[in-house]
């Protein structure tokens, strides 16, 4: 089976799972698939996961999809640790709730308030990027 098909089928299963149970279901499926395999496969997944998290942290300071890469690394590691899977499920539920509140707040704003909010957000992002740049350099 081609890698792209495998990734696509994994993604479809993952997104069809119930929020708040996705990562734990991934953990359970991963453990079932791994039965009978050696410790080296687990070490490989953990190593790749840690490498992706480290790359994601580096990408936060550089142009690139840092948060996405970190999330992929954490998801790989969640396939090996039930506690991490449960934690990521809780984080997902919390982020969904915060996103819904933010969406409701945004919809209540008048057009000029939205423009001012975006301008203030852009200034904060630029200030954070400058601080990060000065810290790294």
Image (spheres, helix red, strand yellow):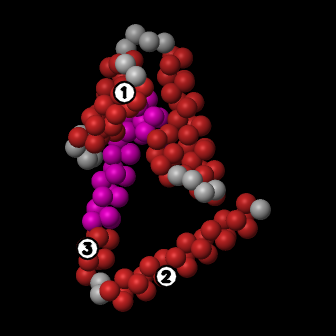
Describe the element under mark 3 as helix, strand or loop.
helix
Give x and y (percent) for residue 70.
51, 46
Residue 93 lies, with reference to residue 104, above or below; the image says above
Describe the element under mark 1 as helix, strand or loop.
helix
Residue 64 in sight here: yes
Q: Which residue is mark 2?
A: 120
Q: Which residue is mark 1?
A: 6
Residue at the image point whose x is 77% and y is 62% from the top: 137
Magenta residues, dominant SS class: helix
Q: Which range is magenta?
A: 74-100
Precedes in sequence: disc 1 or disc 2: 1
Q: Residue 22: which numbered mark, if any?
A: none
Describe the element under mark 2 as helix, strand or loop.
helix
Give x and y (percent) for residue 22.
29, 40
Residue 130 lies, with reference to residue 48, above or below; the image says below
Residue 83 in sight here: no
Residue 88 lies left or right of residue 121; in this view the side is: left
Residue 114 lies, with reference to residue 59, above or below; the image says below
Residue at the image point whose x is 48% and y is 77% from the top: 121
Precedes in sequence: disc 3 or disc 1: 1
- Quadrant (top left/top right/bottom left/bottom right) for the N terminus: top left
What's the CA distance linking mark 1 and mark 2? 42 Å
Give x and y (percent) for residue 108.
25, 81
Residue 49 lies left or right of residue 113; in this view the side is: right
Residue 42 lies, with reference to residue 130, above or below; the image says above
Decide which of 108, 88 is in the foreground and name it: 108
Q: Residue 104: which numbered mark, if any?
A: 3
Residue 108 lies left or right of residue 122; in this view the side is: left
Q: Residue furthest top?
A: 36
Residue at the image point whose x is 32% and y is 64% from the top: 99
């Amino acid at each position: 089976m081609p890698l792209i098909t495998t990734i696509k089928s994994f993604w479809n299963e993952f997104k069809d799972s119930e929020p708040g149970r996705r990562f734990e279901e991934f953990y359970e499926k991963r453990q079932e698939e791994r039965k009978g395999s050696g410790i080296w496969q687990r070490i490989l997944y953990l190593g790749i996961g840690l490498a992706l998290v480290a790359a994601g942290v580096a990408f936060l300071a550089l142009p690139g999809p840092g948060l996405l890469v970190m999330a992929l690394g954490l998801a790989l590691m969640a396939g090996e640790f039930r506690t991490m899977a449960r934690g990521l499920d809780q984080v997902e539920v919390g982020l969904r709730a915060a996103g819904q509140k933010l969406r409701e707040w945004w919809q209540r704003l008048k057009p000029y308030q939205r423009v001012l909010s975006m301008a203030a957000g852009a200034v904060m992002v630029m200030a954070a990027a400058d601080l990060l740049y000065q810290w790294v350099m």
